[in-house]
Image (cartoon, grey):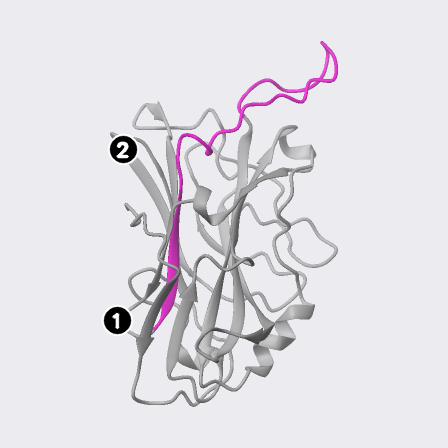
């Protein structure tokens, strides 16, 4: 998969019929591809919205010798204000990684979804491609409220962001996150022909594998490449002519955004 390196702020699609439902129930086609110039491996599944504090997401598959399967879920948060087209704004956060337990009091990532010793076709992976509803099978009009006739994706919204969790201490430590603005994470947002929305994001060799540098003494720390525990991506959807979906607002209290920080 080669996501288009486009930084267009908006993608739009109009439909003639209004949506009739207001419940976010879509299972969204999602995948992670790890690869290099000669080979690649993809794990994929249709993931669903997180609806409880003890959920572990949907299993996509396992990369190489990793000890944990890659799992995924998404959540939707209604935002205040309105978009440039007068519609309601929603932040959609997609989490793909080694999800052991999710919720306000639980750790999202624990084990490595990809170990630094893992190879693809005999060589280390040099990129990771993430896809959420790209092409078809994304979030539909009726996921964003009764009356939605237009969807817009604002990939450069200030609330959009991307993060990668790395674990410098193996399976017992707490991962830290590598983050950056959208301009540092080439991405493409889509309004698909079937009326759904999605995105794709690439992490390349410059930011995929992070080298350890937190050495406190000669007898501790980690100078090796950190394993990857998971990815988080947040993008903003404007649903024009929409009534806010009660279920989307209710999801806010279940879990906040993926924290974008460096510990």
Q: Kindly identify which residue carries mark 2.
A: 39
**Callout 1 crowding tier (Cα within 10 Å): few <14, some 14–19, many ≥20:** few
Would residue 179 appear left or right of 130 to someone viewing this image? right
Predominant SS of the magenta segment? loop
Would residue 68 appear left or right of 249 to someone viewing this image? left
Q: Which is more N-terminal, label 2 or label 1?
A: 2
Farthest top residue in view: 218
Identify the residue at horizontal 75%, vertical 55% (top origin). 105
Q: Kindly identify which residue carries mark 1.
A: 193
The span from disc 1 to disc 2 (Cα, nearest Å) is: 30 Å
Would residue 262 appear left or right of 226 to someone viewing this image? right
**Callout 2 crowding tier (Cα within 10 Å): few <14, some 14–19, many ≥20:** some
Seen in the picture, residue 108 relative to 145 is either above or below; the reply is above
* Closer to the eye: label 1 or 2: 1
Task: Let me know if residue 132 appears in the view.
Answer: no
Percent coordinates x, y for residue 258 in the rendering: 61, 53
Percent coordinates x, y for residue 223 in the rendering: 59, 17
Q: Which one is in front, 66 or 22?
A: 22
- What range is drawn magenta here? 196-225
Seen in the picture, residue 232 relative to 128 is either above or below; the reply is below
């Amino acid at each position: 998969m080669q996501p288009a390196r486009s930084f267009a702020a908006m993608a739009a699609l109009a439909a003639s019929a209004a949506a009739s439902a207001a419940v976010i129930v879509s299972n969204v086609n999602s995948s992670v591809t790890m690869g290099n110039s000669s080979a690649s491996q993809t794990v994929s599944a249709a993931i669903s919205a997180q609806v409880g504090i003890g959920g572990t997401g949907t299993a996509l598959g396992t990369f190489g010798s990793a000890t944990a399967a890659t799992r995924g879920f998404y959540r939707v948060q209604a935002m205040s204000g309105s978009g440039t087209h007068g519609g309601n704004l929603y932040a959609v956060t997609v989490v793909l990684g080694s999800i052991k337990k999710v919720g306000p009091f639980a750790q999202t990532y624990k084990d490595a979804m990809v170990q630094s010793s893992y190879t693809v076709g005999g060589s280390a992976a040099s990129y990771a491609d993430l896809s959420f509803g790209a092409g078809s099978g994304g979030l539909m009009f009726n996921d964003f409220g009764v009356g939605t006739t237009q969807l817009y994706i604002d990939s450069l919204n200030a609330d959009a962001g991307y993060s990668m969790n790395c674990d410098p201490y193996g399976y017992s430590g707490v991962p830290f996150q590598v983050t950056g603005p959208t301009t540092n994470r080439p991405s493409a947002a889509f309004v698909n022909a079937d009326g759904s929305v999605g995105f794709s994001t690439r992490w390349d060799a410059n930011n995929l594998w992070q080298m350890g540098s937190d050495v406190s003494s000669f007898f501790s720390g980690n100078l090796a490449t950190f394993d990857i525990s998971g990815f988080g991506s947040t993008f903003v959807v404007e649903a024009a002519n929409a009534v806010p979906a009660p279920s989307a607002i209710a999801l806010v209290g279940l879990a906040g955004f993926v924290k974008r920080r460096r510990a």
